[in-house]
Image: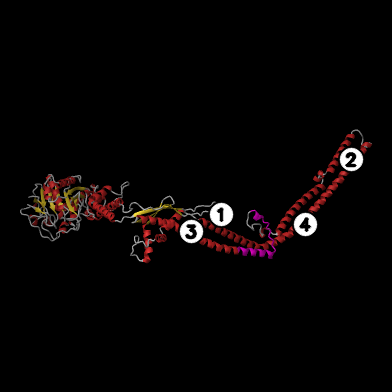
Amino acid sequence: MTEIGGRIAREAGEAREQQRRLGGLSFARAPGAAPEQAAPGTPLVDIDQALKVVLRHRWLVLGTLGLALALAIIVTLLATREYRAEATLQINAQPAQILGSRNQPQPRFRNDDQYLQTQFGILRSRALAERVARDLKLAEDPAFLDPATPAAQRARAAAAKLSRNLEVAPQRGSDLVTLAYTDPDPARAARIANGFAEGFIAATTENRYNTTNYARGFLQDQLAVARERLENSERALVAYAQRQGIVQLDSGSARSSGGREGDGPSAATGDTLSSQTLLGLNNALAQATGERIAAEQAYRQAGGAEVSGEQIADPALQSLRAERARLEADYSERLKTFKPDYPDMLALAAKIAEVKSAIARETGAIASSLASRYRAAAGRERELQAEVAQLRAQVLDLRSRGIGYNFLQREVDTNRELYDALLQRFKEIGVVGELGENQATVIDRALAPMGPYRPQPLRNLGIALVLGLIAGLGLAFLVEFVDDTVKSPEEISDMLGLPVLGVVPRPGKGEKVSEQLEDAKSPVTESYQSITAALRFIGDGGTPRSILVTSSRASEGKSTSSLAIAQSLARGGKRVLLIDADMRNPTFLSDSARLWGLSTLLANTAKLVEMVVPTRLETMWLLPAGPIPSAPAHLLATLRIHEVIAEATATYDVVIVDAPPVLGLADAPTLASICEATVLIVEAGSARRAAIRRTLRRLLDAKASVAGTVLTKFQPKTGSDHESYGYGYGYGQGAAPSAPGLLGKLRRRPGTENKTLDIGT
């Protein structure tokens, strides 16, 4: 027993090592885990996979497309012919300037886009539709409106119909707008389109006229109020000036120069009589001060040692000084010849003294004159200073009394400005009201259309083609999304990351699997030979010594695959033992299988060679399931199954174990943990992805070495139906009747598959 336990441990270690060597399989990612993030540059949509989905459901797509085209044709043939008439309007975003005079009002600033959108809203308004219906008398037209409509609702119904069939289409980048109306009568369509254009122009004109009249009346009332207020403020200003004794100096220069009346000086800034007098006296004082300073300067120069300017400029002094200079020069010249006491010299000296005395007298007269002028200038300056001081006090007193005057003056000015502005605005509105403002112009009137606008057969067929194609593709992908069964080997590789060892096609109608397996050239046989060849390369040592074949649920072809793989290996020269490990619902039944088999071998210590049954192939043997035990899971949970598998691998080259399905049972995971490799059988178009993921998860949790998958019953050109994957396995069913002879004809148990597996004696 110790040797068996050690061998089991070694085999488990070898299995795990082999599983690590098969790292290219899906063991790096557990089933059901989130897929790895796509590498950069990987397209988000798999075009090939999408094409496969479309081809798989091509009849659904084509049927949906054909149905859409048929509906489009029917709708086109049954639709009422409608005609479309169009009229073109130009809407002026800015008012036209008709006059160029200064009195013309300046154009108002408008937001062109906002203004145009407002006009488009007016064109779509219910009020305009009611106006058109009223102008064209459409409410009373039985061809336009149902006569059964109540009279009280006819006007509203006609307006609603007009609004539904009217289309307002602005032309991008311009002030043009197209009014299009659709109607079964072409003439009425043109008449209504023109009615909308004319009604819009008339409505805008009326609105502008009403607005102008209202503004004119409002301004007249405001002008009367402003005039009365101006008159009252002017009376109050005059009365206050009379009470306070304020004399306003208004020479009219302001008016004559183009200014407003009253634009002259105010009482607060010195435009009264006292202020003007103070201003004149202040100028005179400044002038007197200047004269006094000049006289004082001249007087001081005359009284000093220096010669003043007046003395220099005096003609008498100039002649006397010249005479003195001449006499002195003559005296000096004669002094060289005569002595000073010479009579001529004495006479000349007397003349010189007389001239000097005259100069002194003239200089004293000039100094006396300058002193008199200085005293006069100083006296005048003092008088002006006294008057300016007295008048300044009067002006300051007047300023304090002029505060009220200024307040009343500002009120008068404000009232006058308001009155002038209202009067100017009233004149502007009068000019605009007389000239008018061109809001909209009809560029093209609507004409009766020559051909119908709707229905449009080509357009309808194009729309139906697009919608039908979209609906068909949507249904195809919806069906593909709802149908989560595996249909191709690529789906297994993408979903599980496991290699696909092979794909087994579904036999045609009337063909049996047993007959296909007997034919060495049949597609089924070739597929299983390819699977057998793939098993040789899953490990370093070639074909695994023990291979477990299982599936997620029943009837996926695991027993057929077990038999086919065993036969293929046997024909290749291998000594093969096929073990029917499904002790709940055995697959290979015979008379001997009811007496002994795997269940008998697990229940006692018999030898394996005593229980095996030879087959028609010389190198292939079968270990049947034996009598159905009450608790197969308990038998497989003992160490005896390890001994049986170890003895089988020691005796035969390859041991193929046909295990029960994985879901819902503990048998397959237990056996998978013992065998070197596990092959998962997946039925195309029937096995669901969630079930396959759970199956693989259970196998990996049991430390099984999953070599790959085999896709059975594959139909590459057709779809497949959904089936329940519940393991409705035959617990409690009686044993199948034995075939005559020992392992003569080994048949599947009734209820599994309706085919005979003749493996011979």
The image position of residue 427, as x and y in percent, is 55, 58
The secondary structure that most of the magenta stretch takes on is helix
Tell me: residue 243, above or below residue 586: below
The Cα–Cα distance between marks 2 and 4, rounded to whole angstroms, is: 47 Å
The Cα–Cα distance between marks 1 and 4, rounded to whole angstroms, is: 58 Å
The residue that label 2 is drawn on is 352
The residue that label 4 is drawn on is 383
Front tag of 2 and 1? 1
Question: Which mark sits nearer the N-terminus, 3 or 4?
Answer: 3
The residue that label 3 is drawn on is 208
The Cα–Cα distance between marks 2 and 3, rounded to whole angstroms, is: 110 Å
Question: Which mark sits nearer the N-terminus, 1 or 4?
Answer: 1
Secondary structure of residue under mark 1? loop
Question: Which mark sits nearer the N-terminus, 2 or 3?
Answer: 3
Of all residues, the one furthest to the left in this rendering is 741
**Residue 470 is covered by the magenta coloring:** no
The Cα–Cα distance between marks 2 and 1, rounded to whole angstroms, is: 91 Å
The image position of residue 272, as x and y in percent, is 69, 59
Amino acid of disc 1: Asn
Secondary structure of residue under mark 4? helix
Camera-side residue of 351 and 644? 351
Total marks shown come to 4
Q: Is residue 189 visible?
A: yes
Secondary structure of residue under mark 3? helix
Q: Are marks 2 and 4 in contact (CB under 8 Å)?
A: no
Question: Which mark sits nearer the N-terminus, 3 or 1?
Answer: 1
Q: Which residues are magenta?
A: 229-257
Q: Are marks 2 and 1 in contact (CB under 8 Å)?
A: no
Amino acid of disc 3: Arg
Amino acid of disc 4: Glu
The residue that label 1 is drawn on is 103
